[in-house]
Image (cartoon, grey):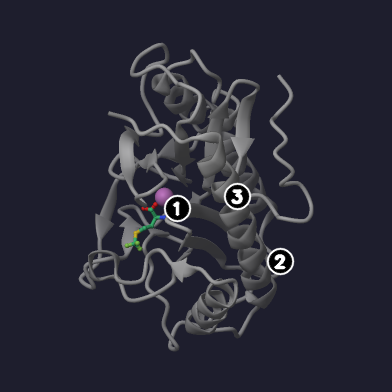
């Protein structure tokens, strides 16, 4: 069963998503050459706790941090460390989640550190657009596969690949709920989207091949071919009017707007 959220629960998730997005905005400002990923993690944890929320990843299956910081060929689940300093020209995926009032929010962005080559900039733009291609399919009556397929087509159209071994998910009273949401697969398949479902859509897009492996730390996922990887995630509610992105900045865009058709 895919859990459905009430209007009230979605309003709470929208507040939580706004807090999460605001904290992440601060983390992004700190992500400059010379900063360590542990400094980013500490800022993120402080910000979440100051808002009266709890980091969602800390303690999850033994994970020890608030953020996942995945640099260059790291795909997801990079562990923050005082020894890992950001360098000009890196890209970093910042993945963050929180729980407040019994409900989770989950999001990620990948950003350049200082100047990056134009082909890298283009890669990041395409990866982010693949998330938005998926979000546009979040309409009642569409099927889960319509999201997966839209993400995959957008990434592959530009010659990039989508990771197969990690997927998006439902989000709500648990960080990971049904359904499992692959970033690839056929359209017009899978369960129908219903008002009240909330999905964490999170494409992981590789510049080279889609194969990944886990490092000996038991967490860090990297591309097998060493190519760059980008990761973007939003928590998105299905409403009768279309997709409502919950993890938008609180004071800027998170007014309960849905995407125009
Ligand atoms: N945002 C990721 C997810 O949705 C990261 C969670 S893994 C954790 O699955 F262990 F770090 F929590
Ligand atoms: Co997630």
Above or below: residue 220 compared with residue 260: below
Measure the alpha-carbon separation of dots 1 and 2.
Answer: 37 Å
The answer to whether residue 111 shows anywhere in this view is: no
Q: Residue at x 41, y 83 (%)?
A: 81
Q: Is residue 258 left or right of residue 54?
A: right
Label 2, secondary structure: give it: loop
Examine the rendered structure and indicate whether residue 231 appears above or below residue 51.
above
Within 10 Å of disc 2 (Cα), the crowding (few <14, some 14-19, many 20+) is few
* Residue at the (70%, 39%) spot, across then down: 256
Dot 1 or dot 3, earlier in sequence: 1
Tell me the quarter of the picture where residue 112 sits: bottom right
Between disc 2 and disc 3, the foreground one is 3
The C terminus - image quarter: top right
Question: Which residue is more in the foreground, 94 or 216?
Answer: 94
- Where residue 34 appears, as percent x and y from the top left, is 60, 85
Marks 2 and 3 close (CB-CB < 8 Å)? no
2 or 226, nearer to the observer = 2
Q: Please name the residue that numbered disc 1 is placed on.
A: 103
Q: CA distance from mark 2 to mark 3?
A: 27 Å
Give the numbered dot on residue 115. Answer: 2
Is 41 left or right of 29, judged from the image as shown? left
């Amino acid at each position: 069963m895919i859990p459905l959220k009430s209007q009230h629960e979605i309003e709470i998730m929208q507040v939580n998503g706004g807090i999460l997005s605001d904290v992440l905005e601060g983390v992004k400002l700190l992500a400059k050459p010379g900063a360590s990923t542990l400094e980013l993690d500490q800022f993120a944890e402080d910000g979440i706790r100051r808002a009266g929320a709890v980091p969602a990843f800390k303690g999850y299956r033994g994970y020890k941090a608030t953020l996942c910081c995945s640099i260059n060929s790291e795909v997801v689940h990079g562990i923050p460390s005082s020894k890992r300093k950001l360098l000009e020209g890196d890209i970093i995926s910042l993945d963050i989640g929180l729980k407040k009032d019994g409900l989770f929010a989950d999001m990620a962005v990948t950003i350049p550190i200082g100047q990056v080559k134009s082909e890298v900039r283009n890669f990041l733009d395409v990866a982010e657009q693949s998330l938005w291609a998926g979000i546009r399919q979040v309409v009642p009556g569409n099927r889960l596969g319509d999201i997966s397929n839209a993400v995959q087509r957008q990434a592959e159209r530009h010659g990039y690949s989508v990771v197969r071994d990690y997927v998006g998910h439902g989000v709500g009273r648990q960080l990971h709920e049904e359904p499992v949401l692959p970033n690839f697969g056929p359209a017009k398949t899978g369960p129908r989207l219903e008002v009240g479902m909330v999905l964490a859509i999170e494409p992981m897009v590789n510049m080279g091949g889609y194969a990944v492996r886990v490092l000996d730390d038991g967490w860090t996922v990297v591309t097998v071919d060493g190519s760059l990887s980008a990761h973007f995630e939003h928590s998105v509610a299905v409403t009768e009017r279309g997709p409502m992105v919950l993890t938008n900045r609180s004071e800027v865009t998170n007014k309960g707007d849905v995407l125009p058709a």
